[in-house]
Image (tube, rainbow, N blue to C red):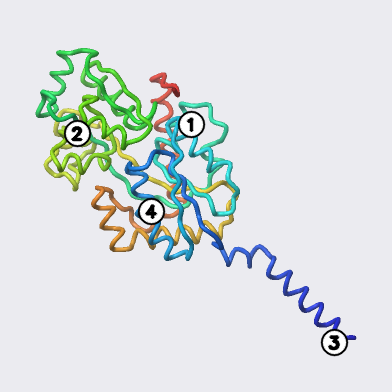
Amino acid sequence: MKSTRRRFLYLTAGAAALASPSVLAQVYPARPITIIVPLPAGGAVDSLARILAEPMRRSLGQTIVIENVSGASGSIGVGRVARAAPDGYTLGIGTGAQYVNNGAIYSLPYDLVKDFAPVALLPKVPFWIIGRKGLPASDLGELIAWLKANPGMASAGTIGSGGDGHLCSIVFRARTGTAFQFVPYRGGAPLIQDLAGGQIDFTCDLASNALSQVRSHNLIPYAVMADARWFAAPDVPAADEVGLQGLYVSAWHGLWAPRDTPEEAIAKLNAAVASALADPAARQRIVDLGMEIPPREQQAPAALGALQKTEIEKRWPIIRAAGIKGE
């Protein structure tokens, strides 16, 4: 009788230990993980997510599913992440356009800081001004002259309303005294497709979105919005070289989880991202996109969280002063 009771207590204690949060955290992940891209497939953010998925799968031992949920400048996809269970199985990847700018543009049903847990800071890439093939301008000076000679006639593609490219174009228009129309797109892939097809005239967009088209001479590059030339296109002048001093625009990428996601899960995910960014094959594919990989110490969750808050303080006043509203 005592032996039976002792065995029962032993099994009960063992079951309780297995059910404890610390033990459950150790077995994470136990099923596939979904990364939500808040933009259409084919753009730079989507490409980065898919590059990271395979090495992350090897590190975590689970399939990484990429799901594209576009609309409302990415705020719909980000909302999916905010509403997901905080268990580490639903993540969101995006740029400052979705995880910073949208907070000043839309009345969101979630808080971009309080409702998310930073996981990892990912590679960044500059923006640049590019035009359609056949545009009567071979350099930025000629583009500005053409815009001034045809006020309100040219069209500039933007991703959503209030995205980084939209802000870049607004500042460019003010600095150059030009006038042109804005044509919003749901993502980089359809924007670049229309630009290459001559449906719009130019754009200030994430440089990696159009790198292959520029290399194929299907689009004309005019200037990189940075203080130095971009390593992926060293022949294209930087903003400072063409009279746009200080007009710097770049997109940093980040990975987020819903708030209250266990720290153990965040730590495992961050380690998997770091491993993916250190993988030689993945690194080469990222470099081929023209993206710069941050040093390991800058890939930490705290670094992403600090950057997000700094960017909110910098960008929100500009967006609100311009009167930009969601469409």
Q: Nearer the viewer, mark 4 or mark 1?
A: 1
Q: Amino acid at mark 2?
A: Ala
Residue type pointed to by label 3: Ser
Pointer 1 or 2: first along the chain: 1
The residue lying toward the viewer, choosing from 139 and 30, is 30
Where 294 sits versus 76, above or below? below
- Disc 4 crowd rating (10 Å Cα; few below 14, some 14-19, many 20+) is some
Contact between labelled residues 3 and 1, with CB atoms less than 8 Å apart = no
> In the image, what residue type sits under mark 1?
Gly
At a point 83% along the width and 82% down the height, the residue shown is 6
Left or right placement of residue 91 versus residue 251 in this view: right
Q: Indicate which label's residue lies in the foreground, 1 or 2.
A: 1
Q: CA distance from mark 4 to mark 1?
A: 24 Å
- Residue at image mark 4: 298
Which callout, 4 or 1, points at the residue further toward the start of the chain?
1
- Image point 16% across, 32% down: which residue? 222
Question: Going by the image, does 139 lie left or right of 101?
Answer: left
Question: Helix or strand or loop: what does disc 3 sit on?
Answer: helix
**In the figure, residue 270 lies in which quadrant?**
bottom left
How far apart, in angstroms, are the residues tagged by discs 1 and 3? 63 Å
Which quarter of the figure has residue 19? bottom right
Q: Secondary structure at mark 1?
A: helix
Q: Amino acid at mark 4?
A: Gln
Give the position of the C terminus as an image quadrant: top left
